[in-house]
Amino acid sequence: MKKLIAEFIGTFWLVLGGCGSAVLAAGFPDLGIGFVGVSLAFGLTVVTMAYAIGHISGCHLNPAVSIGLWIGGRFNGKELVPYILSQVLGGIAGAGILYVIATGKPGFEVGDFAANGFAEHSPGNYSMASALITEIVMTFIFLFVILGTTHSKAPKYLAGLAIGLCLTLIHLISIPVTNTSVNPARSTSQAIFADGSWATGQLWLFWVAPIIGAILAGVVYKYISPETDN
């Protein structure tokens, strides 16, 4: 139960911190933080939680991460479904708090609410194929870095920083394409509160693509550097 509470709180913070920066601060007149600020915010949520709850739950904060770690032989499959449920619920709670805060401003329009999308709902109008490839590749690299930096042979105590910086770079690359998901919990939470039904209609891609990328990374990293090596 303690692990699930940690995952709930961690994913809550990822959504509130990352998506909150996009909704509240990215376009603030004259002082907005833009793509770079939002990218850093997502990375910082992971860095801070990695050191806060990494020793409790592993700080997955993401169904794709849990699946990739399971495929890579680093996570007990019996815990997979409870972890994913905790992550999704934590993300929804974070988005709910963000919605309450954001709608407290007179004239605020919910709009896409930092939801992920493709085609006309992509920030750069990128196609579904571009979005699919982007999310698969970015999630693959994200899990590859996670599996590498948390390996028993990797330098100790630096994993959280490396993983957070990796997520920052992923956002710098892919915000224009999909608003960057690589995390089905993050995508689900924002889709629920976005205006219209388009976000939930496109949500399938932001579950399928990250999971494919995570599975591929788990298979590849387990092959090139299994934990059973001496």
Image (cartoon, rainbow, N blue to C red):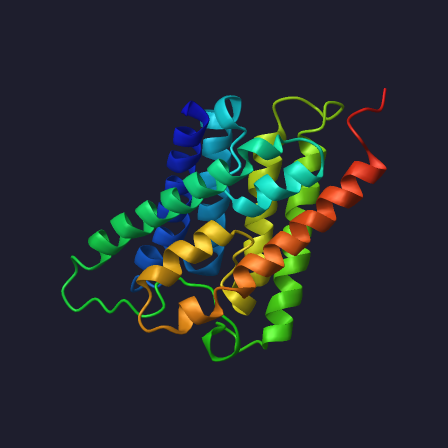
Locate residue 190, reporting x and y percent: 38, 58
Q: Quadrant of the C terminus?
A: top right
Locate residue 228, reporting x and y percent: 81, 24
Q: Is residue 180 above or below residue 97?
A: below
Foreground residue, 107 or 92?
A: 92
Residue depicted at 32% across the width and 73% down the height: 196
138 relative to 189 in the view: left or right: right
Q: Is residue 22 above or below residue 70?
A: below
Locate residue 55, reporting x and y percent: 52, 21
Foreground residue, 36 or 117?
A: 117
Locate residue 68, reporting x and y percent: 65, 43
Q: Is residue 117 above or below residue 87?
A: below
Residue depicted at 53% across the width and 66% down the height: 178
192 relative to 77 in the view: left or right: left
Q: Residue furthest front?
A: 78
Q: Quadrant of the N terminus?
A: top left
Q: Is residue 132 above or below residue 44?
A: below
